[in-house]
């Protein structure tokens, strides 16, 4: 049996990992013409199986499970969830059992995402849509614990304070890596947990810009604001006098839907051909799409030094091959 080696679950360790990620200049003619100095932070390359922002969001959740003496971790997600994929990889890597609570019925053929998760030892439990909507309902959790044993529960998408804390490390590492030579940092938002963490981890004067990929983004701004405030009250937090984050909507391209608008499909092929950088269909594709349009609308002045965070999710390309082949 594999004896998993747990990393030291400290902020320093996470910043050290985050410092290993390359921050590369991106030659993208569309932005170069506009005088924008663009770099990409390659968190998609952090690890082969456990990469992107989901690694950071899981880090202190794994720590909490470990500290609670819990050997099993459960969480929620859909059939293409980057979060469940990362949780399964983390469980295998660090010796936790994992339980994936999946929306919908078990299909005849699992999505590539869930097939990986199951191959890595995650037990999949399929919940009806109404059960799924109840989320961490006590009666349901109790039932699940009776069947599968006790577990530490991580919310869908790793959207809790521990998750956001992990992203502080990205801001701190980036500042050291670039020695302050950048102005703004862009990333895609689902729950906004990563945006809150990144912003709070940047020093005063640096702005985090989140691009919402959701359709009904009603409460997202309030969620980010609440999480950001929570992070600000942690010991050792950088004191931001004014909120150093913005949330931009309108680039969801249909939300999480499995079909992309044709214009977005075309942009996908062109972007990858022009830059050689691979993106995922749900988050980073829309991130670069938004960045191109915002730049063309003059959202950034000429000379702005922009860092775009590639938050990973490339495993999700497998359900969308019709757009890129
Ligand atoms: C989950 C995910 C996001 C969204 O992160 P939030 O913290 O929920 O806003 C962004 N990019 C990728 C690739 C993701 O998998």
Image: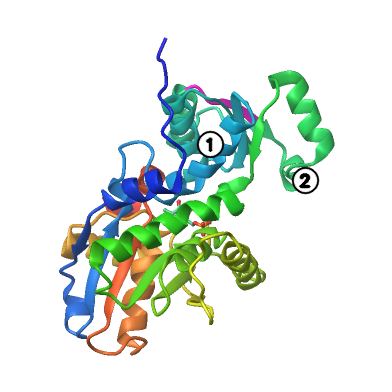
**Residue at x-position 48% and y-position 42%:** 59
Q: Secondary structure at mark 1?
A: helix
The quadrant of the image that shows the N terminus is top left
According to the picture, the residue beneath numbered tag 1 turns out to be: 62
Q: Position of residue 148 (x, y in %)?
A: 69, 20
Q: Image check: 324 left or right of 78?
A: left
- In-front residue for pair 243/310: 243
Residue 218 picture quarter: bottom right
Please identify the dominant SS of the magenta region. strand
Q: Position of residue 33 (x, y in %)?
A: 17, 84
Q: Badge 2, how many Cα within 10 Å: few under 14, some, many 20+?
A: few
Depicted 88 relative to depicted 179: above or below: above
> Which portion, as a residue range, is magenta?
121-125
Q: How many marks?
A: 2
Depicted 62 relative to depicted 308: above or below: above
Name the colouring of the figure: rainbow
According to the picture, the residue beneath numbered tag 2 turns out to be: 134
Q: Is residue 302 magenta?
A: no
Q: Badge 1, how many Cα within 10 Å: few under 14, some, many 20+?
A: many
Q: Position of residue 7 (x, y in %)?
A: 41, 33
Q: Position of residue 123 (x, y in %)?
A: 58, 24
Point out the frontmost of discs 2 and 1.
1
């Amino acid at each position: 049996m594999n004896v998993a080696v747990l990393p030291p679950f400290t902020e320093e360790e996470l910043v050290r990992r985050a410092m290993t990620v390359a921050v590369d200049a991106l030659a993208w003619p569309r932005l170069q013409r506009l005088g924008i100095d663009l770099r990409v932070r390659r968190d998609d390359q952090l690890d082969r199986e456990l990469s992107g922002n989901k690694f950071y969001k899981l880090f202190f959740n794994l720590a909490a499970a470990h500290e609670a003496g819990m050997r099993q971790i459960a969480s929620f997600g859909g059939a293409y969830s980057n979060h469940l994929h990362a949780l399964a990889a983390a469980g295998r890597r660090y010796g936790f059992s994992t339980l994936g609570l999946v929306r919908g019925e078990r299909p005849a053929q699992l999505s590539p995402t869930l097939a990986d998760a199951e191959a890595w030892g995650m037990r999949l439990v399929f919940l009806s849509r109404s059960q799924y909507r109840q989320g961490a309902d006590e009666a349901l959790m109790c039932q699940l614990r009776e069947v599968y044993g006790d577990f530490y529960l991580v919310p869908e998408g790793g959207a809790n304070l521990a998750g956001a804390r992990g992203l502080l490390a990205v801001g701190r590492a980036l500042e050291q890596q670039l020695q302050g030579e950048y102005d703004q940092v862009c990333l895609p938002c689902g729950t906004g947990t990563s945006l809150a963490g990144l912003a709070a981890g940047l020093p005063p004067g640096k702005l985090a810009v989140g691009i919402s990929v959701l359709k009904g983004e009603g409460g997202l701004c309030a969620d980010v604001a609440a999480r950001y405030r929570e992070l600000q009250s942690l010991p050792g937090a950088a004191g931001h006098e004014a909120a150093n984050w913005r949330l931009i909507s309108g680039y969801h391209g249909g939300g999480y839907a499995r079909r992309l608008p044709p214009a977005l499909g075309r942009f996908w092929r062109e972007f990858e051909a022009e830059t050689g950088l691979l993106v995922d269909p749900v988050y980073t594709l829309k991130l670069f799409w938004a960045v191109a349009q915002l730049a063309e609308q003059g959202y950034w002045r000429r000379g702005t030094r922009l860092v775009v965070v590639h938050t990973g999710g490339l495993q999700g390309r497998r359900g969308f091959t019709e757009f890129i082949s």
